[in-house]
Image (tube, rainbow, N blue to C red):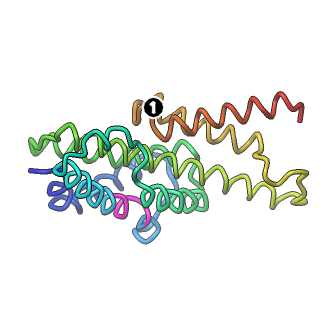
Amino acid sequence: MSLETFLSDNRDEIIKRTRAKVASRSSPQTSPNELEHGVPLFLSQLSATLKDTMAERKDGRDEALQHSPSRTPAISQSAAEHGLILLKLGFTIDQVVHDYGDVCQAVTELAEEKSATLSIVEFQTLNRCLDNAIAGAVTSWSHGRERNMKAETDGKESNPAKPSFVRLLDQAQGAFKALREGTVAINGATGDVLRRSLVDLRALVDSGK
């Protein structure tokens, strides 16, 4: 059985298990509608990505796939929207990371229970999609929090385009948490969020502002 078929056949159970994992932690309460841009949409986009990946593999484009870690713009965009939703609901940056990690855990746990095996390509695709989702959600959450903090003050800023320490620290914290827990690998989109955050933090420190 392919992972795409497995996700389709067990979609409701995966969503149920993921929401149960979220509810088991001290997280703000969420409704099915509020989570519609999270788990269900991620699973749909993951299935679509798997279909495209397997089609490209049949066309002999494995090498191109292996060297294209960021091929899921739709997932990144919807994860960014979900990150903002979680911010409004009161989720912390750590909880945002857990939100997507729970999806992966629910999929792998259920696959093990049903003795379903993932091919190397499918596993790589799952990790790539998860990586892009976490990177998108963490980045948008930190941007949203920065805007909220500025709105609570006079809103004045010498250079609106320049990121704040708070935003960069939030991004670095969220990315580091996902990497430390082994949710994603360091050479992907989440690792790049951490790298860019540290580079920009260094620049802010060096500027003396």
The answer to whether residue 38 is magenta is yes
Tell me where residue 90 appears, x and y as whole percent.
60, 56
**Which of the pair 152/76 is nearer the observer?**
76
Tell me where residue 105 appears, x and y as whole percent.
30, 42
Tell me where residue 124 appears, x and y as whole percent.
29, 40
Tell me where residue 89 appears, x and y as whole percent.
57, 61
**Magenta: main secondary structure:** helix
For residue 63, above or below residue 35? above
Q: Which residues are magenta?
A: 37-42
The residue sitting at 69% across, 53% down in the picture is 145
Q: Secondary structure at mark 1?
A: loop
The residue sitting at 47% across, 46% down in the picture is 134
Neighbours of disc 1 within 10 Å: few (<14), some (14-19), many (20+): few
Residue named by callout 1: 187
**Which of the pair 107/119 is nearer the observer?**
119
Q: Amino acid at mark 1?
A: Asn
Residue situated furthest bottom in the rendering: 33
- Kindly indicate the quadrant of the structure image that contains residue 83: bottom right
